[in-house]
Image: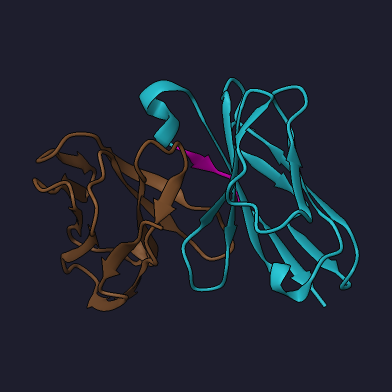
């Protein structure tokens, strides 16, 4: 099936630093979503992207829909301790309604 | 509450027992999804409902898994004769229709442990 490759797998950053992570696919996706999951909770939707080249912000988070439709990027500016968690990219494969998820990027913010 | 709720939050079953997991979606959300999440992995699709109709069950791993949403609201995922490999977090998500179907809101999940 379709696979989404996220990198890096894990990140350790200092509080206040900016963070960048990405997600790539061998196939075209027409929608990209970014979720954050805290331990013991379900994923929480951060940003949805619907158009190639689109750049969308949600507070300190900015995500971009890659122009090739095969990748997406998430940036977090001025990280804070509550940014700790696992970040997943996701998208519908082909005409499917369900989402295919990447394997996640584990973010740790050091004080 | 306004979000998706799931119960129980934790379930321990002995191998061979049947379990039933419940999902209460956001009111008005016609689309409902079940996902399975193994430790250290992203969620993987199990099945999808639009209102009461189960439109896609291609992700169900075996015929021991069964899901229903009889009145188009609450959904139940049932696993018969549980096996150790069924141990995982089961997530329910709901969404609207149209393009918004992809903006899925997840519940906290049910962590199933099969001994």
Q: Is residue A8 left or right of residue B76?
A: left
Residue B67 in view here = yes
Residue A101 appears at what percent x and percent y? 40, 56
- Magenta highlight: main SS: loop
Q: Residue at x 70, y 73 (%)?
A: B85
Residue A29 appears at what percent x and percent y? 26, 45
Q: Is residue A76 left or right of residue B68?
A: left
Which color has been applied to chain B in this rendered view?
cyan
Q: Quadrant of the N terminus of chain B?
A: top right
Give the vertical position of A76 relative to B92 (above or below). below
Residue A45 appears at what percent x and percent y? 40, 44
User: Which stretch appears magenta?
Assistant: B104-108
Viewer-nearest residue: A90 or B83: B83
Q: Residue at x 28, y 39 (%)?
A: A31
Q: How many marks?
A: 0
Which color has been applied to chain A in this rendered view?
brown
Viewer-nearest residue: A43 or A84: A43
Task: Name the quadrant containing residue A7.
Answer: bottom left
């Amino acid at each position: 099936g379709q696979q989404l490759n996220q990198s890096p797998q894990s990140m350790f950053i200092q509080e206040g630093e900016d963070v960048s992570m990405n997600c790539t696919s061998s196939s075209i996706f027409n929608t990209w979503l970014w979720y954050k999951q805290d331990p013991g909770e379900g994923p929480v939707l951060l940003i949805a992207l619907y158009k190639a080249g689109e750049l969308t912000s949600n507070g300190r988070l900015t995500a971009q829909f890659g122009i090739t439709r095969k990748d997406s990027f998430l940036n977090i500016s001025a990280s804070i301790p509550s940014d700790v968690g696992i970040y997943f990219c996701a998208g519908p494969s082909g005409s499917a309604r369900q989402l295919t998820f990447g394997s996640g990027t584990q973010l740790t913010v050091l004080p | 509450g306004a979000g998706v709720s799931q119960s129980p939050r934790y379930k321990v079953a002995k191998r061979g027992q049947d379990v039933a997991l419940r999902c209460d979606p956001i009111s008005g959300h016609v689309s409902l999804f079940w996902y399975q999440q193994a430790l250290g992995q992203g969620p993987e699709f199990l099945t999808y409902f639009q209102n009461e109709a189960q439109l896609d069950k291609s992700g169900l791993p075996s015929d021991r898994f069964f899901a229903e949403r009889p009145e188009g609201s609450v959904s139940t995922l049932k696993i018969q004769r549980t096996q150790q490999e069924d141990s995982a977090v089961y997530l329910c998500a709901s969404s609207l229709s149209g393009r918004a179907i992809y903006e899925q809101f997840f519940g906290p999940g049910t962590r199933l442990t099969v001994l």
